Image (cartoon, coloured by chain):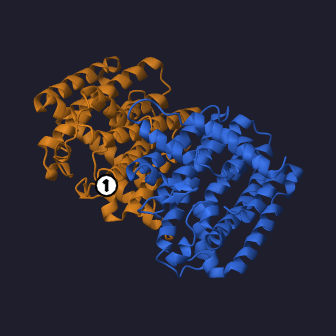
Chain colours: A blue, B orange
């Protein structure tokens, strides 16, 4: 199977589960469920679910288990996009080529939909479908909470907001910010399969190394798309960071060095996968994909 | 020990743990931790933690376990207050006698602090300190997620926002709204001890019945305070609901019938506790407290 076909298949399987997880009830509360669906089922690459599923395949984890973790990651990702897009945050009107959640609904509904998606992610992980051993489910809850919380994604977003007024931040500070903001959830995605497979420490460390390099490469590619992409392709406004005078990998390194650095990171990421042999080919292709993508 | 002393002792013990759970790190992300502390350590009754601890005492649950659950509930409560107070929601400037989180910090920081407190609640429940048996920890994660999510508290807040433009809502609709918005988290608080104690179905049902009546009585008392309280005593603006033309228990029933209804519910709540004998005296006093309180 080609990488593109595998990515599409993973997206399809994840969306099928997400569709089931977020059913709209009767009653006035239906509105928040509709906003949740609008956000989490929006067209997207579903890269994080793909990483969960590809990582789980290394250890022959049951598909049902892996999909639960994949859905949980996507729920958290979708919540973070809703809240990041709010007027008080990045104030974005466009996401994935459509109006952002607070534009399609309203700000209050968008805040609540984000809250509910985040909450649902933990409910999903704690379900017995995720794993027969509750200790494994607890480990996933802990790992996702740490990746998503103030020491991870939320902390990274906090720094990112502060960084808008700090064009003096150096490459070390930007790297720290991005490891928290996007890296932590990508790392969770890559490691979830190892948790589900109850594998020893060494393969987990290898996956963490892979995730670390992949996450940074992903972010540099994002910064490059902001400068070089088109709104039509990326589905969101471009040149936002440069216009805001914000320090990014590209503003600090320049386009050429940033691209070279991303290439270097992808090579490093792939080298972490040696111990897995052919089984990790999709993860290798995913590493190339994150810097070759145009959206 | 008097009820007031027990309530103060529970608040103190919970705050000690919360203080430890939300430490401020170095780095720019410190700002979101400061906002989290500002909100969760704000002066308050800590009624929900008290209910957790009093419920846990019925089943001789270890204090350390009960405190973990108590802290988790208060983290969720604090997050919900931050988000409810936002300009896009209830737009409140005053909470617990101090500026609300978005006034003391800013909107973006307040949104993130709420997100991080919610996330931390699940991290706390999944910790081994909460219970030696991971199946129990997973059960608590599931129960808290259901109480806090779109089928519980968030769904209730969604309806509450819609209700502002629907003065035609009847007592059934308002009851449904409040069972979700405040009742679900109070029910979790009352039942958490039974989960930790792995007790049979019957005592759990009794506690659920108690929680249900207590939650409604609590909300009616809140509506009465909105009409009859003073901002100085309650620490938040009063007459908000009436000014907004919003349907509440008091607007539908009138002050006298609302108070009578609250008294009736407290009596009902207390009758659910018969099987627990003297051990449940603090829960009985808590039921009186929720309608006699002036803040």
**Residue depicted at x 49% and y 50%:** B120
**Residue A73 image position (x, y, % from top left):** 61, 48
Tell me which corner region of the image, top left, top right, bottom left or bottom right, holds residue A257. Answer: bottom right
Tell me if residue A284 can be seen.
yes
Which quadrant of the figure contains the N terminus of chain B? Answer: top left
**Residue B76 image position (x, y, % from top left):** 41, 45
**Residue depicted at x 83% and y 63%:** A271
Viewer-proximal residue among A237 and B158: A237
Q: Residues within 10 Å of mark 1 (few under 14, many from 20)?
A: some
The number of callouts visible is 1
Viewer-proximal residue among A183 and A131: A183
**Residue depicted at x 73% and y 71%:** A262
Instruction: Left or right? Give the position of A73 relative to B81.
Output: right
The single residue placed furthest to the front in the displayed view is A232
**Residue depicted at x 48% and y 49%:** A114
Viewer-proximal residue among B280 and B105: B105
Placement of B37 over or under B181, stated as above or below: below
The residue beneath circle 1 is B42
**Residue B216 image position (x, y, % from top left):** 27, 30
Tell me which corner region of the image, top left, top right, bottom left or bottom right, holds residue A21. Answer: top right
**Residue B206 image position (x, y, % from top left):** 37, 20
The single residue placed furthest to the right in the displayed view is A278
Which quadrant of the figure contains the C terminus of chain B? Answer: top left
User: Which secondary structure, mark 1?
Assistant: loop
Disc 1: host chain: B
Tell me if residue B129 can be seen.
no
Tell me which corner region of the image, top left, top right, bottom left or bottom right, holds residue B188. Answer: top left
Placement of B44 over or under B131, stated as above or below: below
């Amino acid at each position: 199977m080609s990488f593109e076909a595998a990515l599409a298949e993973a997206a399809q399987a994840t969306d099928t589960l997400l569709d089931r997880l977020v059913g709209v009830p009767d009653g006035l509360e239906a509105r928040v469920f509709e906003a949740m669906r609008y956000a989490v089922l929006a067209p997207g690459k579903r890269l994080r679910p793909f990483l969960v599923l590809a990582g789980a395949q290394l250890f022959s984890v049951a598909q049902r288990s892996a999909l639960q973790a994949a859905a949980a990651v996507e729920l958290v990702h979708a919540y973070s996009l809703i809240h990041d897009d709010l007027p008080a945050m990045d104030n974005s009107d466009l996401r994935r080529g459509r109006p952002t959640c607070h534009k399609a609904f309203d700000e209050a509904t968008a805040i609540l939909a984000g809250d509910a998606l985040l909450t649902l992610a933990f409910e999903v992980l704690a379900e017995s479908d995720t794993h027969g051993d509750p200790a494994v489910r607890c480990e996933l809850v802990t790992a996702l909470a740490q990746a998503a919380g103030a020491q991870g994604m939320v902390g990274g977003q906090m720094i990112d907001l502060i960084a808008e007024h700090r064009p003096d931040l150096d490459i070390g500070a930007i790297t720290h910010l991005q490891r928290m903001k996007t890296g932590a959830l990508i790392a969770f995605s890559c490691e979830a399969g190892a948790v589900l497979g109850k594998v020893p420490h060494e393969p987990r460390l290898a996956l963490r190394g892979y995730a670390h390099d992949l996450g940074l490469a992903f972010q540099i590619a994002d910064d490059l798309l902001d400068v070089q992409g088109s709104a039509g392709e990326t589905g969101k406004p471009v040149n936002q960071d440069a216009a805001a005078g914000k320090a990014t990998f590209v503003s600090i390194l320049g386009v050429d060095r940033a691209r070279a650095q991303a290439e270097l990171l992808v090579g490093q990421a792939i080298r972490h996968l040696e111990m897995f042999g052919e089984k990790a080919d999709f993860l290798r292709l995913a590493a190339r994909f994150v810097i070759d993508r145009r959206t």
